[in-house]
Image: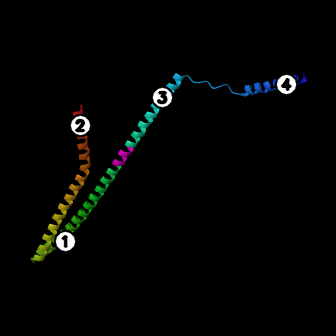
Amino acid sequence: MSDIEELQGRIVAAMQRIRSGLDGLEPAVEVPDPAVAEALEASLQEERLANAQLQERIASLRARHETDLETLKSEIEAQSQAMARLDMDVQRLRHANDQLRDSNAQLRAANEEGVGAPDLINKAMLAELEALRATRATETAEAGAILAKLQPLLAAASTTLADDTTDEEQA
């Protein structure tokens, strides 16, 4: 019998260890309601779709931004070139006007002395022609600068007009 009592003691000790082990365990996780799980999964899918759409929109906006940036850079470059040409023409005009003033002053001095100086008259006429050419070049450069500024605006207006026409045809 002592064997039985010993075995019974061991069994009781094992049961107590099992009980204390079970007491230390946290309660079992409840299985969520399938309807709630499905609703959460649907909500997750909707958010993933919305996120994908936003990512696509961001990519589109970035591409448009890059295009706009390149367009602006090219417009700035064209404006810079037009301004450089205009500056050169203005300098040329100033120089031609200075020559014209000098030639006219010499011509007046020669007329006051009563000396007809054909070379001074020729010089004055050449200076006047150069001044007229420089004035024309300056006006041409100014017109070019104005056209360079208007071309992007006209292109944008043309695109908008074409889009409006397309929208009206689709409606």
Q: Position of residue 8 (x, y in %)?
A: 84, 23
What residue type is disc 2 on? Thr
Label 4 sits on what residue type? Leu
Q: How crowded is mark 1: few (under 14 residues within 10 Å), some or many (20 or more)?
A: some
- Bin the neighbour count of mark 3 within 10 Å (Cα to Cα): few under 14, some 14-19, many 20 and up: few
Instruction: Name the residue nearer the viewer: 43 or 89.
Output: 43
Of labels 1 and 4, the one closer to you: 4
Marks 4 and 3, how far apart at CA: 58 Å
Element on which disc 1 rests: helix
Judging by the rendered image, the residue that carries numbered circle 2 is: 166
Residue 88 to residue 22: above or below:
below
CA–CA distance in space, label 4 to label 2:
94 Å
Marks 1 and 3 sit apart, C-alpha to C-alpha, by 86 Å
The crowding category of the residue bearing disc 4, from other C-alpha atoms within 10 Å (few below 14, some 14 to 19, many at least 20), is: few
Residue 78, label in figure: none
Q: Name the residue under label 1.
A: 102
Residue wearing tag 3? 43
In space, the residues marked 3 and 2 are separated at their CA atoms by 38 Å
